[in-house]
Amino acid sequence: MTALLILGGALLAVLGWLWLWLRSARIHWFWALTGVLPPLALLSGLLNLRHALLPLLVQLAGLGLLGSGLWQLWQADPQQLERLLHGQWSEQQILAVDAGQLQGQLQGQSFLPGQVLLERGVLTLRQGQDFIASKELRIDLRAHGAALLDEEFRLDILPTDSGLLPMVEVLWQDGQTAQPQARRIQRGYTLRLDLKRQPAGVDGQLYLSLPSRLATVVSGNFHVSAADEQTDPDWYRAQPQETGATDATELPATSAGSAQPLALEQLLTRPDNYLRHTMSLETVAGRQLDGEFQGINEEGELLIRQRVGKSGFAVFHVMPDEVSQILLLNP
């Protein structure tokens, strides 16, 4: 309905403008020149109501429908509206190729997941067959526990929602260094997820739109086969319904006496003084990230190098406004 309002309103506004310009051009050559610009065409219509009332009403009706559609889009998905206003059409075209196939963009690059997993409450979309995927997207649903075992599971999240939300993790390989990179997004995104259990696995429908600066949107249908799902009902039922997710791979514990608080302003002002220092970051959502500080990138994000698995590392990107506390583990 929103798309119809936007497209229909835009078409009606353009037709009304052309009609208004033709009517104004018949009155005087001056109105023919000024009517080339839509705002001046409206002015000419207002000054010549006797001859241009009907086309003026058509254009105003089109603008009204267009404005209503944009307002509804802003209410439902502000990030998509922001991309639309910035002229970022490519990802919309990708999603329109095949609405049924799970696809989209990740960090501005084409994302075509070849494997979908549901392991211990974490939905994982992977592109690439290597041990470390070339692109990967994870949605942490562990806080929902036993609800994931229901015949139908539905989740709707808007950018304005607060509280305990699923953490979304984006992983990719840097084009120049081939080093794994990662970002964790804890709020400010749009997520619509439907899961339906079938005898052969789980059928799902997903729409995910991250903040526009991340240029990441994924949409489509998917199927998780029984072989790709780690059911373990006892584990699901053991999870509390309202609990924060913790990282599965953390650095060895450090004694509380050796950890010192570090002010965020101090880290941002003198990042070179803390390069390669091990620190623990606690986010405003209550999650913890331990790793080696790698500096600050051009976008102002903190770079934390953390062990992933048993033999790999990834560099996590954290925005300063997501950090609530920093502990220096090896001062």
Image: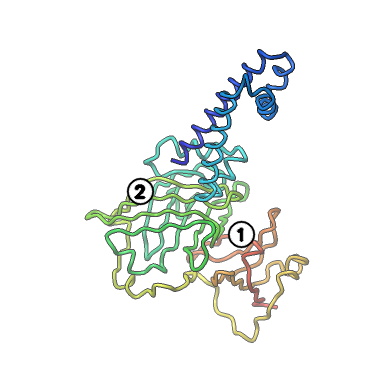
Place of residue 303 in the rendered image (x, y in percent of width and height, measured from the top left): 64, 61
Secondary structure beneath label 2:
strand
Pointer 2 residue = 222
Q: Residues within 10 Å of mark 1 (few under 14, many from 20)?
A: many
Q: Work out whether residue 119 or residue 244 is closer to the camera in this orientation and state it.
A: 244
Q: Residues within 10 Å of mark 2 (few under 14, many from 20)?
A: many
Q: Name which residue type carries label 2.
A: Phe
Place of residue 247 in the rendered image (x, y in percent of width and height, measured from the top left): 49, 69
Q: Name which residue type carries label 1.
A: His
Q: Residue at x 47, y 70 (%)?
A: 245
Place of residue 21 in the rendered image (x, y in percent of width and height, measured from the top left): 64, 20
Place of residue 198 in the rendered image (x, y in percent of width and height, measured from the top left): 24, 54
Q: Is residue 245 shown left or right of residue 199?
A: right
In the displayed structure, would residue 94 be above or below residue 120?
above
Quarter of the image with the N terminus is: top left
Pointer 1 residue = 317
Q: Quadrant of residue 331?
A: bottom right
